[in-house]
Image (cartoon, grey):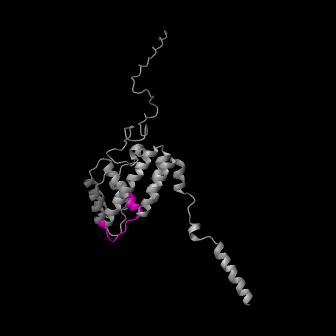
Amino acid sequence: MRLIQSLASVALGASMVLAPSPAVAQTPAFDPSARLREVLPADVAERVLARIAEARARELPAQAIENRALKFAARGVAPSDIEQSVVQQVERMSAAKGILESARPTNRPSADEIDAGGEAIRQGVDGSAVSDLARSAPSGRSLAVPLFVMGSLVERGLPSDEALARVRDRMLARASDAELEALTPARNAAAGSAGQVGLDRAGAARPGGTPGGPTGAGTPRAPTGVPQNGGKASAPTKVPPPPPARRP
């Protein structure tokens, strides 16, 4: 009987050793860090990954920063601009996190809220507007979509205080996230251009290949069917004369 119990104990111990731990089982198959090393020069990749590690240590949404860098690399953005974008976005997220924590001391901001707050600041929303929105939000309401909408409105030319008033009024009226998103115009096709890399607004590249951004990225293209003639005037099209009328 004791032998059977001993064998059972050994078998149980072996199964515990061989069984994969939950941490191993939940490891994602896709590793953004490894991918960043593939798409960026080695020195740039190491600096970007160091800033991402710093963001993680500061309890910022590091995965959103990784995805941001990969997205711009896929679009052909210059590695130096990607690095600058990561550095600046980490600082904007850190500022947004501090603002949200001060405005709502009892509510720990989520990763989505910090990400949306950092993006809203990039788009030109004042820190005071972020704070006012957080303080006036109904208890328990996520600020991710409201911050996203407010940033989109400001980026399209609405003053920060007016964007705040629109979003805050709709939130106080218990509008859903979908109803809030209806406040923003449809995103145009240039949303992924060099102007959206996330550099500081004073020195950001804008559509049209302006200095300070990736060379040639964001240069407007003529609509389909319009010849790429560099703006030169086209020669007038010669219209053939009508055929002579037939005599009866």
| Residue 182 visible, this orientation | no
Q: In terms of image quadrants, where is residue 23?
A: bottom right
Percent x, y of residue 196: 39, 47
In the rendered image, the vertical position of residue 135 relative to residue 159, given as above or below: below
Percent x, y of residue 166: 28, 56
Q: Residue at x 36, y 44 (%)?
A: 204
| Residue 185 falls left or right of residue 37 | left
| Residue 218 falls left or right of residue 99 | right
Q: Give the range drawn in magenta.
A: 102-116
Q: Residue at x 35, y 66 (%)?
A: 141
Percent x, y of residue 50: 46, 56
Nearer to me, 132 or 215: 215
In the rendered image, the vertical position of residue 101 relative to residue 90, given as above or below: below
View extreme (top): residue: 247
- For the N terminus, the image quarter is bottom right
View extreme (left): residue: 161
